[in-house]
């Protein structure tokens, strides 16, 4: 029972962390939440640790190789996203359409990253499509890993929807200057991405080997 409330506890910690960041001196808070700051680097490290966890779980039983490979690719992609490689190479975001229509970027470079993006999104689609029914089944059966995965989804949603959430709340209920919104957005995004990374690692550790038996007839025994 205690393990099942870990996601809720971490999300509460995230809310407390956000409150802390917006109350400490702005210069101190900015050092923590800025691009390449302590929190973002810690998040990237956790995602790369997740890659190692996936490889370790596979080596334990040497089964479900495709599952663990796809899981490791997702971990790696999320870790690289935290490092913002587009700022290092060419200064463009490869997830944006502007990169592919920019006439000043070499066609070969566009094709390379288009292929990489296609493979990444194909992996994501296949991974979630094939495992979603078993996740829902495990959630109904109150399995610990499923609650942790649900906590990850909530944390990553908060981190991803931070612009809309912060803008709506702050502009609707508080007198916040427009120039300060960027800080409040990052102060919400970074802690919850760190929490999401930690929860994702827990999912990779907690997920039972039986989950990987993808046969409907055996779902009731999982």
Image (cartoon, helix red, strand yellow):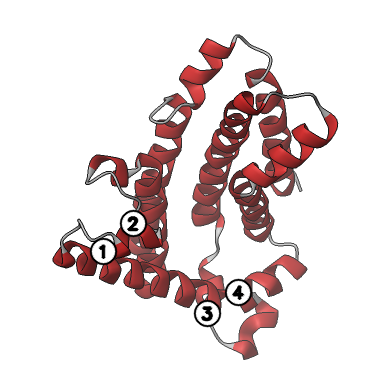
Are the residues tagged 1 and 2 within 8 Å (C-beta)? yes
Which of pointers 4 and 1 lies earlier in the amino acid sequence? 1
Are the residues tagged 3 and 4 within 8 Å (C-beta)? yes
Front position in the image: 191 or 180: 180
Q: Which residue is mark 3?
A: 130
Q: Which residue is mark 2?
A: 94
In this rendering, is residue 182 above or below 32?
A: below
In this rendering, is residue 11 above or below 108?
A: above
Label disc, if present, on residue 113 of the rendered structure? 1
Spatial CA distance of label 4 from label 1 is 28 Å
Spatial CA distance of label 2 from label 3 is 27 Å
Residue drawn at the location 15% of the way across and 67% of the way down = 108
Label disc, if present, on residue 95 of the rendered structure? none
Q: Image check: 75 left or right of 109?
A: right
- Residue 88 appears at what percent x and percent y? 25, 40
Which of pointers 1 and 2 lies earlier in the amino acid sequence? 2
Are the residues tagged 4 and 2 within 8 Å (C-beta)? no
Front position in the image: 122 or 179: 179
Which of pointers 4 and 2 lies earlier in the amino acid sequence? 2
Callout 2 environment at 10 Å: few (<14), some (14 to 19), or many (20+)? Answer: some
Which of pointers 2 and 3 lies earlier in the amino acid sequence? 2
Which of pointers 3 and 1 lies earlier in the amino acid sequence? 1
């Amino acid at each position: 029972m205690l393990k099942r409330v870990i996601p809720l506890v971490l999300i509460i910690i995230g809310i407390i962390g956000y409150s802390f960041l917006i109350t400490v001196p702005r210069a101190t808070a900015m050092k923590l939440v800025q691009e390449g700051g302590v929190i973002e680097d810690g998040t990237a490290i956790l995602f790369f640790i997740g890659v190692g966890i996936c490889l370790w779980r596979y080596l334990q039983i040497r089964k479900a190789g495709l599952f663990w490979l796809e899981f490791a690719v997702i971990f790696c992609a999320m870790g690289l996203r935290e490092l913002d490689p587009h700022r290092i190479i060419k200064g463009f975001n490869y997830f944006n359409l502007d990169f592919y229509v920019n006439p000043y970027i070499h066609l070969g470079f566009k094709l390379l990253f288009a292929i990489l993006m296609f493979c990444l999104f194909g992996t994501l689609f296949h991974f979630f499509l094939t495992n979603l029914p078993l996740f829902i089944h495990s959630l109904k059966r109150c399995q610990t890993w499923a609650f942790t995965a649900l906590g990850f989804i909530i944390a990553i949603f908060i981190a991803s929807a931070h612009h809309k959430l912060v803008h709506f709340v702050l502009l609707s209920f508080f007198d916040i200057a427009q120039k300060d919104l960027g800080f409040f957005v990052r102060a919400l995004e970074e802690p919850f991405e760190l929490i999401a990374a930690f929860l994702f690692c827990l999912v990779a550790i907690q997920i039972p080997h039986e989950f990987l038996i993808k046969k409907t007839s055996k779902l009731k025994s999982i």
